[in-house]
Amino acid sequence: MQTDRVLTGILRAGALLAVLVMLLIFCFLLFESWSALTGLSIAGFLTDVSWHPLEGTYNLMPMLSGTLLASIGAIMLGAPLGLASALFIVFFAPLHLALLYRRLIELLAGIPSVVFGFWGLTTLVPLISEWQPPGASLLAAVLVLTLMILPMITITACAALTAVPEELFRNASALGMSRWGTIAGVVLPAARVGITAGIILAAARALGETMAVLMVAGNVVQHPESLFDPVRTLAANIALEVAYAMGDHRSVLFVSGLLLMLLVMVLSAMAGLLEERQQV
Amino acid sequence: MITMTGIFPASRLVAAKAVIAICGLIWTVSGAANAGPQRLVLTGSSTVAPLINEIARRFEMQFSGVRIDVQTGGSSRGINDVRRRTADIGMVSRPLKPDENDLHAFTVALDGISLLVHADNPVAALDKSQIAGIFTGDIMRWRDVGGKDARITVVNKAEGRSTLELFLDYLQLKNSAITPHIIIGDNAQGIKTITGNRNAIGYVSIGAAEYEVQRGAPLRLLALDGVEASEENVRNGTFPLSRPLNLVTASDPQGVIRQFIRFAQSPQVQDLIKAQYFVPVDAD
Amino acid sequence: MLLRAKQQIRDGVIQGLIYLAVLLVSLVFFWMLFDLAHGGAAHLSWQFLTESPIDAGRAGGIASILVSTALILLVALTASVPLAWATAVLLAEFVPAESAFGKIVRFSLYVLAGVPSIVFGLFGNAFFSIYLELGFSILSGGLTLACMLLPILTSTAEAGLRAVPDTYRSSAAALGLSRTVALTHLILPAAAPTLAAGLLIGIGRALAETAALLFTSGYVDRMPGSLLDSGRALALHIFDLSMNVPGGDNPAYASALVLVSLLLCINILAMKLAYGLQRKKIMT
């Protein structure tokens, strides 16, 4: 059994390295953020007049609002469409159509974000620009993000809906409930937790999405007053500025990266907890 | 850490060895990779990059065994990368600032910055106060400056770009006073944005703009202070917004770096500079 | 009776709404595919795949981009697959799910899985490019991607190993086989299709990635000579063509078409492997 011991040792080393990678990433982000977290006042991130790093003002709020608005908008559009798609696949469509549509959604899930961004830039932005210039706007970001998170919501909702026990349906039809009555009164409540977890994960994805949003949102740092105003998200800001940022500026970008990571971690922890509760 | 050792009673040594082995692997691979041709990395201004790319190709043809990689990202990135040693030479499309006197600059060519609108835009010229009005949001519609009744789309450069700094300098404005609708990075992105939007106004390198106009891009360069934005007026010094295009190094250049900078300043590349609509330094 | 009629109307309306939503999603999807195919097909040819980009990608092809992409992928997989699979085997076969070590590893992977790709890019830039002095290179980009792939590869492999019936393990133990032999001769072969499917999913994710590569592998579009050269990935090429190259839309469409077709093939293959396995499990 000597080989077993050696093997276990090697495997443990591998796993340990995986843990180290996580620690390394976290420590490095913290290390690079340190000078901003200690040198600048944290309140400045909330109260500085604007985001103009070269003038020494580091207000992150407009970008935080841009990030949240774009994600909330995408969830508000993506959740009903995704849920409808899942209901279609599980309950409404004839079998072959359901399978076909499911494949379509799975293919949609495989399209890279830069292609969504490119399509948004060449098709959606000019369309919006005809209607309400300048086109590159919060609306464009919301629409592109919706397309990106829709497959995720659909697939997780499908899984949650199919996991609802068969006997619940039989009981419902025995009670003479209509199809929608059964779905709204029995199935959706039973699958609620799984569907919510999927939506939260999709929100996490939307918050962290960079390239697609960068390409269509116009990237002006401001609190948008309407859907047609351009916005900049935290992730896009990092991508735009990290190349030339120095000193405090670079450090603040790492702070925003850390902030983004924490936001996403909280969301995925919430989804994880929900799923665990589901299993119990 | 105490809990960690608790978890790995016997395999701590193995783990440590594995970490060392992997680090070693990375270094060996990078060492082996290093054995290739001599490499020069240049980063920075998107105004200078297309020119340097052409010069680099010619340099590589003449001096085999050298590979030159060029990446954009703005003048500040050039300065930054040179200081951090991630680049050998920085490309900077402005004079060095007082706090950058730790660096060495070598001028390769001259360029100007011009206002740019779509070719369909009837507005022929703007005076300085109109320009400031448009960029600060006081003038919202083209009608107010003699154009069509449409909302103006203000295209501004991202921070860290010297085109932005020089333009603001010219208008005597701070970036926080500008109310942009779209923020762009590279010159080419600005040109692409304006060719795609009839109501947009922006500003880019004259060389980059003329290069695209010659290739048929629907663009028009606007005169500044009544002086036409042309290579000619940059050369004779009458254009109000001119600047040097510099190569920047962290220390006194030696070896290939010195060779390349000399080459970029030599008469051998003047045809390349002119082909990009820039002005060679010793042209007059 | 009235109630029944009301219910029927309500059911009909809701069914209509659901069909409408599905129609909308399908239409947008086909609209997008049509745009890609329409814009790219004319530009796509054998030469496009075998020539290197000329004139910032407006002319020529994507050969050097494909090579860089493949190299980045290779580095990423070489670094992440052994680690990920070792971790998966350990978690699935050797460590009880409730042990402290298992929990720590699983938690780390869970956190890693949630990190947005731009944050990996930040880390890669700070650690691989600057701290380890690998610069903007295929090696930095590949190693950054490796960190990103770690959780995906581990979780898919662990799920695959756990799906192997316990009878395999108990029969092996009854025959007096060591766990190493059981693992290499019984369990890994049985889990091979899921491992392969997980690998394909990881490759798909890596091919689609842009943000993590922006500041690690850089965007030099030439044929890389070594792993320390900067190399532009295909997804980054699409980004650059569409944002920074006036007149770059057609090659961008063609490149997007190539990337999407590649990813579709990979995804279909991965699905085939996963579904095939499911069918087998149902049959036994």
Image (cartoon, grey):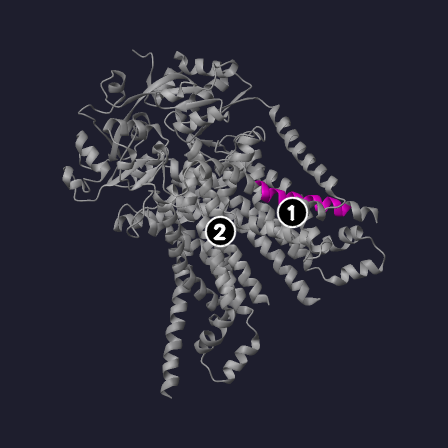
Left or right: B96 as drawn, with respect to A93: left
Measuring 26% from the left and 47% from the top, which residue is drawn there? A133
* Residue with the mark numbered 2: A264
Please state which of the two labelled residues, at mark 1 or mark 2, is closer to the viewer: 2
Indicate the amino acid at tag 1.
Ala
Query: Looking at the picture, do discs 1 and 2 lie on one chain?
Result: no
Q: Image quadrant of residue B218? A: top left
- As drawn, is B262 to the left or to the right of B173? right
Q: Is residue A110 visible?
A: no
Q: Secondary structure at mark 2?
A: helix
Label 2: few (<14), some (14–19) or many (≥20) C-alpha neighbours in 10 Å: many
Q: Chain of mark 2?
A: A
Kindly report the distance in space between the C-alpha atoms of the residues bearing marks 1 and 2.
22 Å
Report in which chain the residue with disc 1 lies.
Answer: C
Magenta-drawn segment: A7-24
Instruction: Give the answer, above or below, for where C12 lies relative to C199.
Output: below
Please name the residue shown 72% across and 46% down the image: B8
Q: Residues within 10 Å of mark 1 (few under 14, many from 20)?
A: many
Estimate the x, y position of residue A69 in percent, counting from the top left. Answer: 37, 53
Prevailing SS of the magenta stretch: helix
Q: Return the residue nearer the eye: A116 or B94.
A: B94
Amino acid found under the numbered disc labelled 2? Val
Residue drawn at x 47%, y 27% is B81
Q: Does the rendering let one see residue C151?
A: yes
* Residue C84 badge: 1
Q: On the rendered structure, is B9 left or right of B260?
A: right
Q: Magenta stretch containing residue C79, yes or no?
A: no
